[in-house]
Image (cartoon, rainbow, N blue to C red):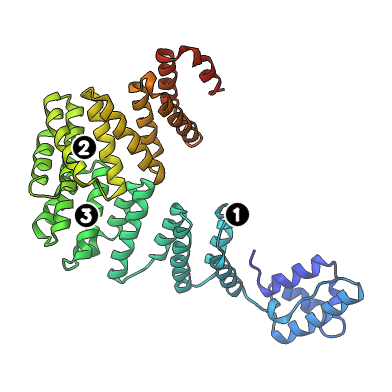
């Protein structure tokens, strides 16, 4: 894509089928031109002016509407690559499939300092376009040979954020360990706490509990930030729960609910609902379902993602306790929150499946709206489990409609 002046000279001559003899005229020899075209001699600006003059004369004589300018001919690969990258960054939309290889070629042609700067700009551009995987790739490239520890810490937080979106927790672990030795020598500070917290979260997601517990205990001991301390203790509860150590998880979540806001209590109790469902402890479920519901209804949950999670667990808890009216209400609200924020298709599919197990004949109008959402989601994820629940609902309550529903899956 990017050609040296000598390569451009040859390409332009071949394009218009001009011979070396025609091009050189009386100004230079064919041998000299040949050496330039094969790269044995460099094209000077003086020679370029003579050749461009001859090119444009020949094209005019042949009636060809094309021309070549000295400044364009003399641009080297790096200059062309930088111009290309600048144009890419100006665009409102980028078709990544079409230009990604050209971008890589352009980055290859520029010096290391410029490459790092443009990689950072490309990260910001693709992040704004929600092309998170590509954005992460350029952010990582921008960190090549970076020595400033402040920049490293800031960029690690951005990488953790992107990997959380992408679900690439192993990528977060790998990124941290690349700089682990340097980070270990750093003086304790707020940004280091945040980096260590996010790294510990990724470790738990990757089931690397020993190092995660070591980091969590360090954070609990050293942080002076009450909110981070609270989040770290939640992370500890999450780790115990994920390990199946429900006694320690219960202790952590019970402790977290003491003296906190109704939102914090609702969150802690929703985790207890999950544990009760996992252990099939109905008494535990009854106790914490009611506590979660009461605290949730005080003022709701401001964070939409957390709201979606708590509503889902309230719905599941109510269903297990055969409180179908409450269960339907919680699940329906969770679907609304999930749809408006485009949350996990898989989790929304799961809620739809749960709903069709408790829908009754009188819920027919709700059934129709949920059906429509299911078929829209089906385009993104080929999950037919909720579809089976839909057919079971019609078989049980409206058998006359069953044949029509079968046709919808064709």
Identify the disc placed on residue 136: none
Within 10 Å of disc 3 (Cα), the crowding (few <14, some 14-19, many 20+) is many
Residue at screen point 46% across, 60% down:
128
69 left or right, relative to 388: right
The residue at which mark 3 appears reads as 197
In the rendering, at what x and y percent does residue 272 appear? 16, 35
Image-quadrant location for residue 57: bottom right
Q: Are marks 2 and 1 in contact (CB under 8 Å)?
A: no
**Residue 23, image x and y in percent?**
84, 77
The answer to whether 266 is drawn above or below residue 179 in the figure is above
Determine which residue is flagged by label 2.
242
Task: State which quadrant residue 13 falls in.
Answer: bottom right
Secondary structure of the residue carrying numbered label 1: helix
Label 3 residue SS: helix
- Measuring from the top left, give residue 263's x and y in whole percent: 19, 47
Labels 3 and 2 touching (C-beta < 8 A): no
Q: Name the N-terminal-most of marks 2 and 1.
A: 1
| Above or below for 31 versus 409 | below
Image disc number at residue 98: 1
Q: How far is the residue under mark 2 from the one under mark 1?
A: 42 Å
Q: Answer with mark 3 or mark 2, whichever residue precedes in sequence.
A: 3
Q: Is residue 250 left or right of residue 29?
A: left
Place of residue 118 in the rendered image (x, y in percent of width and height, measured from the top left): 48, 69
Q: Which is nearer the eye, 277 or 238?
A: 277
């Amino acid at each position: 894509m990017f050609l040296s002046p000598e390569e451009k000279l040859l390409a332009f001559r071949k394009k218009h089928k001009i011979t070396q003899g025609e091009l050189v005229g009386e100004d230079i020899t064919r041998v000299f031109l040949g050496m330039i075209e094969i790269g044995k001699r460099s094209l000077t600006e003086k020679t370029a002016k003579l050749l461009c003059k001859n090119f444009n004369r020949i094209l005019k004589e042949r009636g060809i509407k094309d021309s070549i300018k000295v400044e364009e001919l003399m641009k080297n690969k790096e200059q062309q690559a930088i111009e290309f990258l600048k144009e890419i960054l100006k665009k409102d939309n980028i078709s990544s499939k079409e230009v990604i290889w050209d971008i890589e070629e352009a980055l290859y042609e520029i010096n290391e300092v410029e490459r790092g700067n443009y990689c950072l700009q490309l990260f910001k551009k693709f992040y704004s376009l929600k092309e998170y995987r590509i954005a992460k790739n350029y952010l990582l490239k921008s960190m090549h040979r970076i020595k400033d520890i402040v920049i490293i810490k800031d960029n690690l937080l951005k990488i953790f954020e992107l990997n959380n979106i992408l679900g690439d927790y192993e990528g977060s672990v790998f990124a941290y360990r690349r700089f682990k030795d340097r980070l270990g020598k750093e003086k304790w500070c707020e940004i280091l706490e945040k980096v260590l917290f996010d790294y510990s979260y990724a470790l738990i997601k990757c089931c690397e509990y020993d190092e995660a517990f070591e980091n969590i205990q360090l954070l609990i001991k050293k942080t002076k930030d009450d909110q981070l301390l609270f989040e770290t203790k939640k992370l500890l509860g999450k780790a115990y729960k994920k390990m199946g150590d429900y006694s320690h998880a219960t202790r952590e979540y019970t402790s977290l609910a003491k003296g906190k806001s109704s939102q914090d209590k609702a969150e802690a109790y929703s985790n207890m609902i999950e544990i009760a469902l996992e252990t099939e402890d109905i008494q535990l479920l009854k106790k914490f379902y009611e506590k979660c519901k009461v605290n949730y209804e005080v003022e709701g949950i401001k964070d939409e993602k957390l709201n979606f999670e708590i509503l889902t667990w309230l719905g599941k808890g109510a269903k297990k306790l055969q409180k179908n009216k409450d269960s339907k209400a919680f699940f329906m609200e969770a679907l609304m929150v999930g749809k408006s924020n485009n949350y996990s298709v898989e989790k929304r599919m799961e809620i739809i499946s749960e709903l069709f197990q408790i829908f009754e004949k009188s819920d027919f109008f709700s059934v129709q709206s949920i059906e429509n959402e299911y078929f829209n989601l089906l385009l993104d994820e080929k999950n037919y489990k909720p579809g089976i629940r839909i057919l079971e609902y019609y078989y049980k309550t409206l058998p006359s409609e069953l044949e029509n529903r079968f046709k919808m899956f064709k």
